[in-house]
Amino acid sequence: MGYVSTPPFWCMRVTTRREFVAETAALVAGVAAVPQEPRTASKSPAVMPPFELEEATIADLAKGMQAGKYTARSLCQAYLSHIAQVNTRGPAIRAVLEVNPDALAIADALDAERKANGARGPLHGIPVLLKDNIATADRMATTAGSLALVGATAPRDAFVADRLRAAGAVLLGKTNMSEWANFRSTHSSSGWSGRGGQCRNPYALDRSPCGSSSGSGAAIAANLAAAAIGTETDGSIVCPSSAQALVGIKPTLGLVSRWGIVPIAHSQDTAGPMARTVADAALLLGVITGADSRDASTAGAESHRSDYVAALDPNGMRGVRVGVARTKLFGYHPPTDKVAEAAIDAMKQLGAVIVDPADIPHVGEYDDAELDVLLYEFKADLKNYLAEFGAGVPYRSVRDLIDFNLAHAREELVFFDQDLFVKADAKGGLDDAGYAAAVEKCRTLAIKQGLEAAFAQFNVDVFVAPTGNPAWTIDLVNGDHFVGSSSTPAAVAGYPSITVPAGFVAGLPVGISLIGKPYSEPLLVRVAYAYEQASKMRRPPRFLPSADLRAP
């Protein structure tokens, strides 16, 4: 679901594949114009009209509706207007693929319900965006960014979408993403999809939004909705959140159902919230968690569900033992280390007990096994998804998608190839000895001898490390330029993590990640909230054409 490696957007119907192909040609022209290197001559931000809802929290919007200042309809109208100004015009961040043609009608119904019966809860009437790999049984498409799935019809909402609708959220639209959740090529550009073109980072338009939840990150950073849902296999919630000054939560594997989400691998996939504040992310997490008989991993989810909002405590850092995981998770970028050290000092001042160093064993020693697991499971899991959610398109396997891309190479393979697809297609089934060996290596090194052993050895409550380096320049020739990150230990082990804004490097956001034990989300929320409230590091983007290399 994410591996760290004006039509069509205003259309009032799902566009046909032929139309998308034509539209993509125009998008490709725009993508090619994305600057490949930082421009230092012009540092003027885009001239943007004032936006009433800038940095508004879910609580702010809910209070406004309760007081009669806003309605669900007026909020949707405001966000739709803002999307129109920045998504494909102005800074043209290309974060939103399409808006829900029924959004205003849904908002009207929710306003009538509020008037008659009161609010369902804190999400009643709140506009939320979904990543384009989360199925919705409505007039929006679910394509994982690929032209191949344009026209596919979902029989039902994905579990996550269903939970949001039941809570009264307005599903405002679908966000752009790294195509196939960044699992098509080792040379991909995060945020590029055949369907949507290149998503841009609103802090510096020539910088990557990271991926694969690129559009979810860029949209919420740019205040195009109250919050969004992203998905992660390894880094694809926390990286775009870090790169765009957001809070992102990657839940414990099995806390949130993956049913109805275009998969990479069931061993690591999960959905999670992306928001501007810890409080908003906590609220959203509480809505989307729960057991689902269609996803066996969630069998224990109900017993681990919690009121994450109740965990919000500005004094929540006191007495928490924080282990600093230095080896291989620090040292790859000195300015990022400086931000992280300041965050750790702040945690100490807030009453945390800092255990330094507290290294996680075997980091980097199971990367080959992780990739093998993902390749095997992608082939099998995608086949299952397409069988259930692929009505309306003829594709039922990775091999079919490879053939589609070859037939539509001018649209789909214009910048990078599909080597990961080819490798996945060459794998056998999940009964292969090679698959079993890769799974065992991951479980042994990432869990038993990795995080599980480290938590016991250092007697810590959480581990801390920089989430990753600042956003790199978009490069459609060579692909992404990762320097380092801390997402893999929690991703492979299935442990939870949260990233929080920690500072800026050359005006580009940098986040700090906290990794917890399984189902320790309440603790992670509490600690992250205490740090957030004391540090107040988030600031909205200015849509600069390039990074200000002289900024602190």
Image (spheres, rainbow, N blue to C red):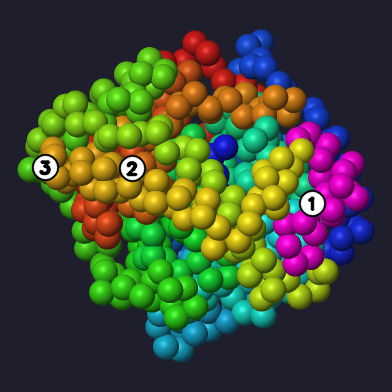
Give the labeled residue for mark 2.
Answer: 445
**Taking 417 as reference, is 96 left or right?**
left
Residue 411 shown in magenta: yes
Image x and y of residue 522, in percent: 24, 58
Locate the C terminus by quadrant: top left
On the image, the x and y values in percent for residue 437 come to: 45, 50
Magenta region = 395-416
Identify which residue is drawn at 75% across, 67% down: 396
Q: Is residue 242 magenta?
A: no
Q: Residue 452: image x %, image y %?
A: 23, 48
**Residue type, label 1:** Ile
Give the spatial CA distance, label 2 vs label 3.
19 Å
Kind of residue at disc 2: Leu
Query: Can you identify the residue that label 3 sits on?
Result: 459
Numbered disc 1: secondary structure: helix
Which amino acid type is shown beneath numbered disc 3? Answer: Asn
Q: Is residue 364 above or below residue 383?
A: above
Q: Which mark is residue 503?
A: none
